[in-house]
Amino acid sequence: MSPSSQSQSPFSPLKHPYFKLIWLATLVSNLGSLVQGVGAGWMMAELTPSHDMVALVQASTTLPIMLLAMPAGALADNMDRRRVMLASQGFMAMVSALLAFAAWQGWLQPWSLLIFTFLLGLGSAMHLPSWQASVRDLVPREDLAAAVTLNSMSFNLMRSIGPAAGGLLVAWAGPEAAFALNAVSYMALIYALARWRSPAEEGRLPAERLGSAIGVGVRYVLLSPNLMRIMARGFVFGVAAVVLLALLPVVTRDLLRGSATTYGLLLGAFGLGAIGGALASPWLRRRLGIEAIVAGSFVAFAAGTVMVALSIHMALALVGLLIAGSAWVSALSLFNVSTQLATPRWVVGRVLAIYQTSTFGGMALGSWVWGGLSEVWGTVPALLCASVLMLVGAALGRVLRMPDFSEVDLDPANRFHEPALRLNLKARSGPITIMVDWDIAPENTEAFLSEMVERRKVRLRDGARDWSLMRDLENPDIWIECYHVPTWTDYIRHNQRRTRADAGNYDRLLALHRGPERPHVHRMIERRAVTAHDDMPIIERPKTM
Protein backbone atom coordinates (compact mmCIF):
# COMPACT_ATOMS: atom_id res chain seq x y z
CA MET A 1 0.00 0.00 0.00
CA SER A 2 1.52 3.33 -0.96
CA PRO A 3 1.83 6.15 1.50
CA SER A 4 -0.32 8.44 -0.55
CA SER A 5 -3.32 6.27 -0.04
CA GLN A 6 -3.30 6.59 3.70
CA SER A 7 -2.72 9.17 6.35
CA GLN A 8 0.40 8.86 8.52
CA SER A 9 -1.48 9.97 11.65
CA PRO A 10 -5.01 8.95 12.68
CA PHE A 11 -5.64 12.58 13.73
CA SER A 12 -4.29 14.40 10.66
CA PRO A 13 -7.80 15.15 9.22
CA LEU A 14 -8.45 17.38 12.24
CA LYS A 15 -6.09 20.00 10.76
CA HIS A 16 -8.86 20.83 8.27
CA PRO A 17 -11.10 23.36 10.09
CA TYR A 18 -14.54 22.39 8.79
CA PHE A 19 -13.90 18.68 9.17
CA LYS A 20 -12.83 19.35 12.76
CA LEU A 21 -15.95 21.45 13.44
CA ILE A 22 -18.36 18.87 12.04
CA TRP A 23 -16.47 16.00 13.67
CA LEU A 24 -16.73 17.62 17.11
CA ALA A 25 -20.42 18.35 16.56
CA THR A 26 -20.91 14.74 15.52
CA LEU A 27 -19.41 13.67 18.85
CA VAL A 28 -22.21 15.49 20.65
CA SER A 29 -24.87 14.11 18.31
CA ASN A 30 -23.52 10.57 18.70
CA LEU A 31 -23.63 10.91 22.47
CA GLY A 32 -27.32 11.75 22.28
CA SER A 33 -28.02 8.89 19.86
CA LEU A 34 -26.30 6.34 22.07
CA VAL A 35 -28.05 7.55 25.20
CA GLN A 36 -31.32 7.29 23.28
CA GLY A 37 -30.40 3.76 22.19
CA VAL A 38 -29.88 2.69 25.79
CA GLY A 39 -33.22 4.21 26.75
CA ALA A 40 -35.06 2.49 23.89
CA GLY A 41 -33.40 -0.89 24.42
CA TRP A 42 -33.98 -0.92 28.17
CA MET A 43 -37.52 0.41 27.91
CA MET A 44 -38.38 -2.40 25.48
CA ALA A 45 -36.83 -4.96 27.85
CA GLU A 46 -39.12 -3.60 30.60
CA LEU A 47 -42.22 -3.38 28.40
CA THR A 48 -42.05 -6.99 27.16
CA PRO A 49 -40.23 -10.25 27.99
CA SER A 50 -40.08 -11.14 24.26
CA HIS A 51 -36.53 -11.56 22.91
CA ASP A 52 -37.86 -10.84 19.41
CA MET A 53 -39.17 -7.42 20.39
CA VAL A 54 -35.94 -6.48 22.16
CA ALA A 55 -33.90 -7.45 19.09
CA LEU A 56 -36.29 -5.53 16.83
CA VAL A 57 -35.24 -2.26 18.48
CA GLN A 58 -31.89 -2.68 16.71
CA ALA A 59 -33.59 -3.86 13.51
CA SER A 60 -35.97 -0.87 13.49
CA THR A 61 -32.95 1.45 13.43
CA THR A 62 -31.02 -0.37 10.71
CA LEU A 63 -33.91 -1.45 8.45
CA PRO A 64 -34.67 2.13 7.25
CA ILE A 65 -31.04 2.52 6.21
CA MET A 66 -31.44 -0.54 4.00
CA LEU A 67 -34.75 0.69 2.57
CA LEU A 68 -33.85 4.34 1.94
CA ALA A 69 -30.13 4.15 1.27
CA MET A 70 -30.49 4.11 -2.53
CA PRO A 71 -32.85 7.11 -2.82
CA ALA A 72 -30.70 8.91 -0.24
CA GLY A 73 -27.56 8.15 -2.24
CA ALA A 74 -29.17 9.48 -5.43
CA LEU A 75 -30.07 12.68 -3.58
CA ALA A 76 -26.49 12.93 -2.28
CA ASP A 77 -25.16 12.86 -5.87
CA ASN A 78 -27.76 15.24 -7.32
CA MET A 79 -28.53 17.79 -4.58
CA ASP A 80 -26.69 20.04 -2.16
CA ARG A 81 -25.49 17.49 0.41
CA ARG A 82 -25.34 20.10 3.14
CA ARG A 83 -29.04 20.87 2.76
CA VAL A 84 -29.92 17.17 2.78
CA MET A 85 -28.01 16.73 6.04
CA LEU A 86 -29.61 19.80 7.63
CA ALA A 87 -33.09 18.54 6.76
CA SER A 88 -32.30 15.09 8.13
CA GLN A 89 -30.96 16.44 11.41
CA GLY A 90 -33.97 18.70 11.85
CA PHE A 91 -36.34 15.78 11.26
CA MET A 92 -34.57 13.57 13.81
CA ALA A 93 -34.58 16.34 16.41
CA MET A 94 -38.35 16.70 16.00
CA VAL A 95 -38.95 12.93 16.25
CA SER A 96 -36.76 12.66 19.35
CA ALA A 97 -38.67 15.49 21.03
CA LEU A 98 -41.99 13.76 20.29
CA LEU A 99 -40.60 10.46 21.61
CA ALA A 100 -39.53 12.11 24.86
CA PHE A 101 -42.97 13.67 25.28
CA ALA A 102 -44.76 10.35 24.57
CA ALA A 103 -42.54 8.54 27.11
CA TRP A 104 -43.12 11.26 29.72
CA GLN A 105 -46.87 10.92 29.24
CA GLY A 106 -46.69 7.12 29.57
CA TRP A 107 -48.14 6.53 26.10
CA LEU A 108 -45.44 4.21 24.76
CA GLN A 109 -46.12 0.55 24.06
CA PRO A 110 -43.74 -1.93 22.35
CA TRP A 111 -44.97 -1.23 18.81
CA SER A 112 -45.21 2.54 19.24
CA LEU A 113 -41.64 2.57 20.57
CA LEU A 114 -40.54 0.65 17.46
CA ILE A 115 -42.30 3.19 15.23
CA PHE A 116 -40.39 6.07 16.82
CA THR A 117 -37.04 4.27 16.50
CA PHE A 118 -37.93 3.44 12.89
CA LEU A 119 -38.53 7.13 12.16
CA LEU A 120 -35.16 8.02 13.69
CA GLY A 121 -33.66 5.37 11.43
CA LEU A 122 -35.27 7.07 8.43
CA GLY A 123 -33.57 10.35 9.31
CA SER A 124 -30.25 8.60 9.76
CA ALA A 125 -30.71 6.82 6.40
CA MET A 126 -31.13 10.16 4.62
CA HIS A 127 -28.15 11.71 6.44
CA LEU A 128 -25.50 9.01 6.10
CA PRO A 129 -24.83 8.91 2.31
CA SER A 130 -24.57 12.71 2.11
CA TRP A 131 -22.25 12.86 5.11
CA GLN A 132 -19.98 10.05 3.98
CA ALA A 133 -19.80 11.43 0.43
CA SER A 134 -19.00 14.90 1.86
CA VAL A 135 -15.87 13.67 3.61
CA ARG A 136 -14.10 13.93 0.24
CA ASP A 137 -15.06 17.62 0.16
CA LEU A 138 -13.56 18.19 3.61
CA VAL A 139 -10.21 16.39 3.38
CA PRO A 140 -7.75 15.51 0.57
CA ARG A 141 -7.31 11.95 -0.70
CA GLU A 142 -4.26 11.24 1.48
CA ASP A 143 -6.32 11.91 4.61
CA LEU A 144 -9.44 10.06 3.49
CA ALA A 145 -8.67 6.73 5.20
CA ALA A 146 -7.87 8.48 8.47
CA ALA A 147 -11.00 10.65 8.17
CA VAL A 148 -13.26 7.61 7.71
CA THR A 149 -11.60 5.92 10.70
CA LEU A 150 -12.00 9.10 12.76
CA ASN A 151 -15.70 9.10 11.95
CA SER A 152 -15.92 5.56 13.29
CA MET A 153 -13.91 6.66 16.30
CA SER A 154 -16.32 9.55 16.85
CA PHE A 155 -19.21 7.14 17.26
CA ASN A 156 -17.28 4.64 19.31
CA LEU A 157 -15.64 7.25 21.52
CA MET A 158 -19.14 8.17 22.58
CA ARG A 159 -20.04 4.48 22.74
CA SER A 160 -17.40 4.10 25.45
CA ILE A 161 -19.09 6.69 27.68
CA GLY A 162 -22.53 7.27 26.16
CA PRO A 163 -24.14 3.95 27.08
CA ALA A 164 -22.79 4.09 30.61
CA ALA A 165 -24.06 7.65 30.93
CA GLY A 166 -27.32 6.56 29.34
CA GLY A 167 -27.66 3.68 31.80
CA LEU A 168 -27.14 6.01 34.74
CA LEU A 169 -29.55 8.57 33.27
CA VAL A 170 -32.22 5.94 32.63
CA ALA A 171 -31.79 4.51 36.12
CA TRP A 172 -32.01 7.99 37.67
CA ALA A 173 -34.58 9.85 35.53
CA GLY A 174 -36.15 7.26 33.25
CA PRO A 175 -36.00 6.66 29.45
CA GLU A 176 -37.81 9.92 28.70
CA ALA A 177 -34.76 11.85 29.93
CA ALA A 178 -32.55 9.91 27.51
CA PHE A 179 -34.91 10.73 24.65
CA ALA A 180 -34.94 14.43 25.57
CA LEU A 181 -31.15 14.58 25.72
CA ASN A 182 -30.98 13.09 22.22
CA ALA A 183 -33.34 15.76 20.87
CA VAL A 184 -31.08 18.53 22.20
CA SER A 185 -27.89 16.87 20.93
CA TYR A 186 -28.88 17.35 17.28
CA MET A 187 -28.51 21.12 17.68
CA ALA A 188 -24.70 20.90 17.69
CA LEU A 189 -24.55 19.26 14.26
CA ILE A 190 -27.22 21.57 12.85
CA TYR A 191 -25.06 24.54 13.94
CA ALA A 192 -21.88 23.06 12.41
CA LEU A 193 -23.58 22.30 9.09
CA ALA A 194 -25.03 25.81 9.00
CA ARG A 195 -21.50 27.22 9.35
CA TRP A 196 -20.01 25.06 6.59
CA ARG A 197 -20.34 26.12 2.97
CA SER A 198 -20.01 23.05 0.81
CA PRO A 199 -18.17 23.55 -2.52
CA ALA A 200 -20.40 24.43 -5.44
CA GLU A 201 -20.76 21.70 -8.04
CA GLU A 202 -19.46 22.61 -11.47
CA GLY A 203 -21.57 22.04 -14.52
CA ARG A 204 -24.93 23.20 -15.74
CA LEU A 205 -26.68 19.88 -16.26
CA PRO A 206 -29.99 19.33 -14.47
CA ALA A 207 -30.31 16.69 -11.77
CA GLU A 208 -31.00 13.13 -12.86
CA ARG A 209 -34.44 11.65 -12.33
CA LEU A 210 -34.51 9.58 -9.15
CA GLY A 211 -35.25 6.24 -10.79
CA SER A 212 -32.62 6.74 -13.49
CA ALA A 213 -30.03 7.87 -10.94
CA ILE A 214 -30.60 4.77 -8.82
CA GLY A 215 -30.36 2.52 -11.87
CA VAL A 216 -27.05 4.08 -12.93
CA GLY A 217 -25.64 3.57 -9.42
CA VAL A 218 -26.69 -0.08 -9.32
CA ARG A 219 -25.25 -0.70 -12.79
CA TYR A 220 -21.95 0.89 -11.78
CA VAL A 221 -21.60 -1.45 -8.80
CA LEU A 222 -22.63 -4.55 -10.77
CA LEU A 223 -19.93 -3.80 -13.37
CA SER A 224 -17.24 -3.22 -10.71
CA PRO A 225 -15.89 -6.56 -9.35
CA ASN A 226 -13.94 -4.89 -6.54
CA LEU A 227 -17.06 -3.17 -5.25
CA MET A 228 -19.07 -6.37 -5.45
CA ARG A 229 -16.54 -8.15 -3.25
CA ILE A 230 -16.62 -5.35 -0.69
CA MET A 231 -20.44 -5.41 -0.60
CA ALA A 232 -20.57 -9.19 -0.14
CA ARG A 233 -18.11 -9.21 2.75
CA GLY A 234 -19.86 -6.23 4.36
CA PHE A 235 -23.20 -8.07 4.19
CA VAL A 236 -21.84 -11.19 5.89
CA PHE A 237 -20.14 -9.09 8.57
CA GLY A 238 -23.35 -7.14 9.19
CA VAL A 239 -25.48 -10.27 9.55
CA ALA A 240 -23.11 -11.90 12.06
CA ALA A 241 -21.73 -8.92 13.99
CA VAL A 242 -25.08 -7.37 14.89
CA VAL A 243 -25.78 -10.31 17.22
CA LEU A 244 -24.00 -8.62 20.13
CA LEU A 245 -25.80 -5.29 19.77
CA ALA A 246 -29.16 -6.96 19.16
CA LEU A 247 -29.02 -9.40 22.08
CA LEU A 248 -26.95 -7.43 24.59
CA PRO A 249 -30.05 -6.29 26.54
CA VAL A 250 -31.06 -9.95 26.86
CA VAL A 251 -27.50 -10.96 27.81
CA THR A 252 -27.52 -8.28 30.48
CA ARG A 253 -30.92 -9.23 31.85
CA ASP A 254 -30.83 -13.03 31.62
CA LEU A 255 -27.19 -14.14 31.62
CA LEU A 256 -25.58 -11.52 33.85
CA ARG A 257 -28.66 -10.57 35.88
CA GLY A 258 -27.70 -6.93 35.47
CA SER A 259 -29.47 -3.59 35.38
CA ALA A 260 -29.62 -0.66 32.97
CA THR A 261 -26.29 0.52 34.39
CA THR A 262 -24.74 -2.88 33.61
CA TYR A 263 -26.08 -2.67 30.07
CA GLY A 264 -24.52 0.76 29.63
CA LEU A 265 -21.14 -0.43 30.94
CA LEU A 266 -21.14 -3.39 28.55
CA LEU A 267 -21.88 -1.10 25.59
CA GLY A 268 -19.16 1.21 26.87
CA ALA A 269 -16.65 -1.66 26.75
CA PHE A 270 -17.63 -2.33 23.14
CA GLY A 271 -17.07 1.34 22.32
CA LEU A 272 -13.75 1.45 24.15
CA GLY A 273 -12.56 -1.52 22.12
CA ALA A 274 -13.65 0.27 18.95
CA ILE A 275 -11.53 3.28 19.88
CA GLY A 276 -8.54 1.00 20.28
CA GLY A 277 -9.28 -0.51 16.88
CA ALA A 278 -9.48 2.94 15.29
CA LEU A 279 -6.17 4.05 16.82
CA ALA A 280 -4.49 0.82 15.70
CA SER A 281 -5.85 0.97 12.14
CA PRO A 282 -3.09 3.17 10.58
CA TRP A 283 -0.41 0.99 12.19
CA LEU A 284 -2.09 -2.17 10.91
CA ARG A 285 -2.55 -0.76 7.39
CA ARG A 286 1.18 0.04 7.17
CA ARG A 287 2.10 -3.56 8.03
CA LEU A 288 -0.69 -5.78 6.72
CA GLY A 289 -2.80 -6.04 3.59
CA ILE A 290 -6.48 -5.13 3.65
CA GLU A 291 -7.59 -8.77 3.38
CA ALA A 292 -5.43 -9.81 6.34
CA ILE A 293 -6.96 -7.08 8.52
CA VAL A 294 -10.53 -7.88 7.45
CA ALA A 295 -10.12 -11.64 7.92
CA GLY A 296 -8.51 -11.03 11.30
CA SER A 297 -11.43 -8.80 12.27
CA PHE A 298 -13.89 -11.59 11.45
CA VAL A 299 -11.94 -14.06 13.60
CA ALA A 300 -11.48 -11.59 16.47
CA PHE A 301 -15.18 -10.74 16.53
CA ALA A 302 -16.04 -14.44 16.62
CA ALA A 303 -13.70 -14.92 19.59
CA GLY A 304 -15.22 -11.96 21.43
CA THR A 305 -18.74 -13.23 20.81
CA VAL A 306 -17.85 -16.67 22.19
CA MET A 307 -16.46 -15.02 25.33
CA VAL A 308 -19.71 -13.11 25.83
CA ALA A 309 -21.76 -16.26 25.24
CA LEU A 310 -19.81 -18.18 27.88
CA SER A 311 -19.73 -15.32 30.40
CA ILE A 312 -20.91 -16.06 33.90
CA HIS A 313 -19.20 -13.03 35.39
CA MET A 314 -19.25 -9.53 33.98
CA ALA A 315 -15.43 -9.32 33.65
CA LEU A 316 -15.28 -11.97 30.91
CA ALA A 317 -18.11 -10.27 29.01
CA LEU A 318 -16.27 -6.93 29.20
CA VAL A 319 -13.10 -8.47 27.70
CA GLY A 320 -15.12 -10.14 24.94
CA LEU A 321 -16.84 -6.86 24.09
CA LEU A 322 -13.50 -5.00 24.02
CA ILE A 323 -12.20 -7.48 21.43
CA ALA A 324 -15.42 -7.39 19.41
CA GLY A 325 -15.52 -3.58 19.40
CA SER A 326 -11.96 -3.38 18.05
CA ALA A 327 -12.81 -5.84 15.27
CA TRP A 328 -16.06 -3.98 14.49
CA VAL A 329 -14.41 -0.65 13.70
CA SER A 330 -11.42 -2.22 11.91
CA ALA A 331 -13.66 -4.09 9.47
CA LEU A 332 -16.34 -1.45 8.88
CA SER A 333 -13.91 1.43 8.40
CA LEU A 334 -11.96 -0.60 5.83
CA PHE A 335 -15.16 -1.54 3.98
CA ASN A 336 -16.12 2.14 3.86
CA VAL A 337 -12.81 3.63 2.78
CA SER A 338 -12.23 0.84 0.22
CA THR A 339 -15.62 1.68 -1.28
CA GLN A 340 -14.80 5.38 -1.51
CA LEU A 341 -11.35 4.89 -3.03
CA ALA A 342 -12.77 2.54 -5.68
CA THR A 343 -15.50 4.98 -6.75
CA PRO A 344 -15.41 8.23 -8.79
CA ARG A 345 -16.95 11.31 -7.26
CA TRP A 346 -19.97 11.52 -9.59
CA VAL A 347 -21.46 8.28 -8.23
CA VAL A 348 -19.89 8.02 -4.75
CA GLY A 349 -23.12 8.85 -2.89
CA ARG A 350 -25.02 6.06 -4.64
CA VAL A 351 -22.23 3.52 -4.24
CA LEU A 352 -21.90 4.31 -0.54
CA ALA A 353 -25.67 3.94 -0.29
CA ILE A 354 -25.48 0.47 -1.86
CA TYR A 355 -22.70 -0.41 0.57
CA GLN A 356 -24.91 0.74 3.44
CA THR A 357 -27.82 -1.22 2.02
CA SER A 358 -25.75 -4.40 1.99
CA THR A 359 -24.17 -3.89 5.41
CA PHE A 360 -27.13 -2.45 7.31
CA GLY A 361 -29.50 -4.75 5.46
CA GLY A 362 -27.37 -7.58 6.80
CA MET A 363 -27.67 -6.09 10.28
CA ALA A 364 -31.45 -5.81 10.02
CA LEU A 365 -31.66 -9.42 8.82
CA GLY A 366 -29.27 -10.57 11.52
CA SER A 367 -31.21 -8.79 14.27
CA TRP A 368 -34.36 -10.64 13.22
CA VAL A 369 -32.61 -14.01 12.79
CA TRP A 370 -30.65 -13.93 16.06
CA GLY A 371 -33.68 -12.68 17.98
CA GLY A 372 -35.73 -15.59 16.65
CA LEU A 373 -33.01 -18.14 17.38
CA SER A 374 -32.57 -16.74 20.88
CA GLU A 375 -36.31 -17.04 21.47
CA VAL A 376 -36.41 -20.70 20.34
CA TRP A 377 -32.96 -22.11 21.25
CA GLY A 378 -31.71 -19.64 23.85
CA THR A 379 -29.30 -16.72 23.88
CA VAL A 380 -26.07 -18.74 24.13
CA PRO A 381 -26.76 -20.94 21.05
CA ALA A 382 -27.67 -17.84 19.03
CA LEU A 383 -24.37 -16.16 19.95
CA LEU A 384 -22.39 -19.30 19.10
CA CYS A 385 -24.13 -19.65 15.72
CA ALA A 386 -23.20 -16.05 14.88
CA SER A 387 -19.58 -16.85 15.81
CA VAL A 388 -19.53 -19.71 13.34
CA LEU A 389 -20.87 -17.40 10.62
CA MET A 390 -18.06 -14.97 11.42
CA LEU A 391 -15.50 -17.71 10.78
CA VAL A 392 -17.22 -18.44 7.46
CA GLY A 393 -16.89 -14.74 6.62
CA ALA A 394 -13.15 -14.92 7.26
CA ALA A 395 -12.84 -18.00 5.01
CA LEU A 396 -14.69 -16.17 2.21
CA GLY A 397 -11.51 -14.17 1.69
CA ARG A 398 -10.19 -17.05 -0.39
CA VAL A 399 -12.80 -16.43 -3.09
CA LEU A 400 -13.93 -12.84 -2.35
CA ARG A 401 -10.61 -11.24 -1.51
CA MET A 402 -10.72 -7.60 -0.45
CA PRO A 403 -8.91 -5.26 -2.90
CA ASP A 404 -5.97 -3.28 -1.57
CA PHE A 405 -6.20 0.50 -1.67
CA SER A 406 -5.78 1.56 -5.28
CA GLU A 407 -3.77 4.43 -6.73
CA VAL A 408 -6.09 4.59 -9.76
CA ASP A 409 -6.90 8.23 -10.53
CA LEU A 410 -10.69 8.57 -10.48
CA ASP A 411 -10.78 12.34 -10.88
CA PRO A 412 -12.67 13.62 -13.96
CA ALA A 413 -10.69 13.42 -17.20
CA ASN A 414 -12.19 16.75 -18.40
CA ARG A 415 -11.40 15.96 -22.03
CA PHE A 416 -14.90 16.22 -23.44
CA HIS A 417 -16.07 19.35 -25.21
CA GLU A 418 -19.71 19.58 -26.16
CA PRO A 419 -19.91 19.59 -29.97
CA ALA A 420 -21.52 22.42 -31.89
CA LEU A 421 -24.76 21.16 -33.42
CA ARG A 422 -26.57 22.45 -36.49
CA LEU A 423 -29.78 20.85 -35.32
CA ASN A 424 -31.48 22.71 -32.50
CA LEU A 425 -31.90 20.15 -29.70
CA LYS A 426 -33.55 20.52 -26.35
CA ALA A 427 -31.94 19.02 -23.24
CA ARG A 428 -34.52 16.22 -23.17
CA SER A 429 -34.38 15.48 -26.91
CA GLY A 430 -33.74 11.85 -27.72
CA PRO A 431 -33.18 9.00 -27.92
CA ILE A 432 -29.60 9.49 -29.10
CA THR A 433 -27.52 6.95 -30.99
CA ILE A 434 -23.72 7.26 -30.97
CA MET A 435 -21.51 5.51 -33.54
CA VAL A 436 -17.69 5.69 -33.49
CA ASP A 437 -15.68 4.58 -36.56
CA TRP A 438 -12.40 2.79 -35.82
CA ASP A 439 -9.87 1.94 -38.57
CA ILE A 440 -7.82 -0.99 -37.26
CA ALA A 441 -5.02 -2.81 -39.09
CA PRO A 442 -5.44 -6.62 -39.20
CA GLU A 443 -2.37 -7.22 -37.05
CA ASN A 444 -3.88 -5.02 -34.28
CA THR A 445 -7.29 -6.69 -34.25
CA GLU A 446 -6.65 -8.88 -31.21
CA ALA A 447 -5.30 -5.97 -29.14
CA PHE A 448 -8.22 -3.79 -30.26
CA LEU A 449 -10.82 -6.36 -29.19
CA SER A 450 -9.11 -6.79 -25.83
CA GLU A 451 -9.30 -3.03 -25.18
CA MET A 452 -12.93 -2.99 -26.35
CA VAL A 453 -13.86 -5.41 -23.54
CA GLU A 454 -12.79 -2.73 -21.07
CA ARG A 455 -14.36 -0.02 -23.23
CA ARG A 456 -17.73 -1.74 -22.96
CA LYS A 457 -17.55 -1.83 -19.15
CA VAL A 458 -16.64 1.85 -19.00
CA ARG A 459 -19.46 2.84 -21.37
CA LEU A 460 -22.11 0.85 -19.50
CA ARG A 461 -20.87 1.95 -16.06
CA ASP A 462 -21.15 5.58 -17.16
CA GLY A 463 -24.75 5.25 -18.38
CA ALA A 464 -24.66 3.95 -21.96
CA ARG A 465 -27.23 1.40 -23.11
CA ASP A 466 -27.26 -1.35 -25.75
CA TRP A 467 -23.53 -1.15 -26.45
CA SER A 468 -22.37 -3.16 -29.46
CA LEU A 469 -19.33 -3.52 -31.71
CA MET A 470 -19.85 -4.09 -35.44
CA ARG A 471 -17.48 -4.86 -38.34
CA ASP A 472 -17.91 -3.61 -41.88
CA LEU A 473 -18.36 -6.59 -44.23
CA GLU A 474 -17.08 -4.67 -47.28
CA ASN A 475 -14.16 -3.05 -45.46
CA PRO A 476 -13.16 -5.38 -42.57
CA ASP A 477 -10.64 -2.89 -41.19
CA ILE A 478 -13.53 -0.61 -40.16
CA TRP A 479 -15.09 -1.33 -36.77
CA ILE A 480 -18.10 0.63 -35.51
CA GLU A 481 -18.73 1.08 -31.80
CA CYS A 482 -22.41 1.82 -31.17
CA TYR A 483 -24.41 2.68 -28.07
CA HIS A 484 -27.54 4.59 -27.04
CA VAL A 485 -28.48 7.15 -24.39
CA PRO A 486 -32.02 8.37 -23.63
CA THR A 487 -31.47 12.12 -24.16
CA TRP A 488 -28.88 14.66 -25.27
CA THR A 489 -28.39 15.65 -21.62
CA ASP A 490 -27.63 12.01 -20.79
CA TYR A 491 -25.02 11.98 -23.56
CA ILE A 492 -23.27 15.06 -22.11
CA ARG A 493 -23.45 13.58 -18.62
CA HIS A 494 -22.12 10.24 -19.88
CA ASN A 495 -18.98 11.89 -21.26
CA GLN A 496 -18.41 14.14 -18.26
CA ARG A 497 -18.27 11.03 -16.05
CA ARG A 498 -15.09 9.77 -17.72
CA THR A 499 -12.23 9.50 -15.24
CA ARG A 500 -8.51 9.86 -15.88
CA ALA A 501 -8.11 6.12 -15.35
CA ASP A 502 -10.78 5.43 -17.99
CA ALA A 503 -9.06 7.83 -20.37
CA GLY A 504 -6.06 5.48 -20.47
CA ASN A 505 -8.23 2.89 -22.22
CA TYR A 506 -9.20 5.45 -24.88
CA ASP A 507 -5.56 6.46 -25.37
CA ARG A 508 -4.57 2.84 -26.01
CA LEU A 509 -7.40 2.46 -28.51
CA LEU A 510 -6.38 5.71 -30.19
CA ALA A 511 -2.85 4.35 -30.64
CA LEU A 512 -4.32 1.38 -32.55
CA HIS A 513 -6.44 3.58 -34.83
CA ARG A 514 -4.99 4.28 -38.28
CA GLY A 515 -4.95 7.65 -39.94
CA PRO A 516 -4.06 11.20 -38.90
CA GLU A 517 -7.58 12.01 -37.74
CA ARG A 518 -9.31 10.80 -34.61
CA PRO A 519 -12.09 8.23 -35.02
CA HIS A 520 -15.15 9.86 -36.52
CA VAL A 521 -18.11 10.12 -34.13
CA HIS A 522 -21.67 10.08 -35.48
CA ARG A 523 -24.18 11.61 -33.08
CA MET A 524 -27.72 10.92 -34.26
CA ILE A 525 -31.19 11.42 -32.92
CA GLU A 526 -33.66 8.66 -33.61
CA ARG A 527 -36.78 9.58 -35.57
CA ARG A 528 -39.43 7.35 -37.08
CA ALA A 529 -40.31 8.15 -40.68
CA VAL A 530 -43.69 6.49 -40.25
CA THR A 531 -45.87 5.69 -37.28
CA ALA A 532 -45.70 2.32 -35.62
CA HIS A 533 -49.15 1.52 -37.05
CA ASP A 534 -48.13 2.40 -40.61
CA ASP A 535 -44.96 0.35 -40.21
CA MET A 536 -46.96 -2.87 -39.86
CA PRO A 537 -47.16 -5.06 -42.97
CA ILE A 538 -50.49 -5.00 -44.77
CA ILE A 539 -52.07 -8.40 -45.15
CA GLU A 540 -54.84 -8.57 -47.69
CA ARG A 541 -57.76 -10.74 -46.84
CA PRO A 542 -58.79 -13.26 -49.49
CA LYS A 543 -61.88 -12.30 -51.36
CA THR A 544 -64.94 -14.26 -50.48
CA MET A 545 -67.06 -15.81 -53.15
Image: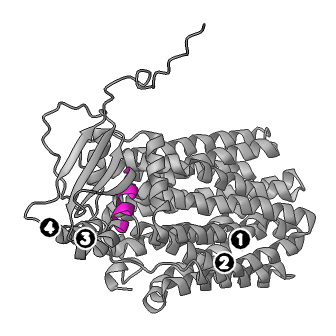
Q: Please state the extent of the stretch shown in magenta in the rendering.
A: 453-465
Magenta stretch encompasses residue 456? yes
- Crowd rating for badge 2 (residues with CA inside 10 Å; few <14, some 14–19, many 20+): many
398 to 487, vertically: above or below:
below
Residue indicated by mark 3: 504
Labelled pair 2, 3 in contact (Cβ < 8 Å): no
Q: Nearer the viewer, mark 4 or mark 1?
A: 4
Give the mark nearer the N terminus: 4 vs 1.
1
Give the mark nearer the N terminus: 2 vs 3.
2
- Considering depth in this image, is 218 or 10 the residue closer to the camera? 218
Give the mark nearer the N terminus: 3 vs 4.
3
- Considering depth in this image, is 408 or 379 the residue closer to the camera? 408
Labelled pair 1, 2 in contact (Cβ < 8 Å): yes
Q: Which mark is residue 240?
A: 1
Q: Estimate the spatial distance between the alpha carbons at disc 1 and disc 2, rounded to whole Å.
A: 9 Å
Q: Estimate the spatial distance between the alpha carbons at disc 2 and disc 3, rounded to whole Å.
A: 35 Å
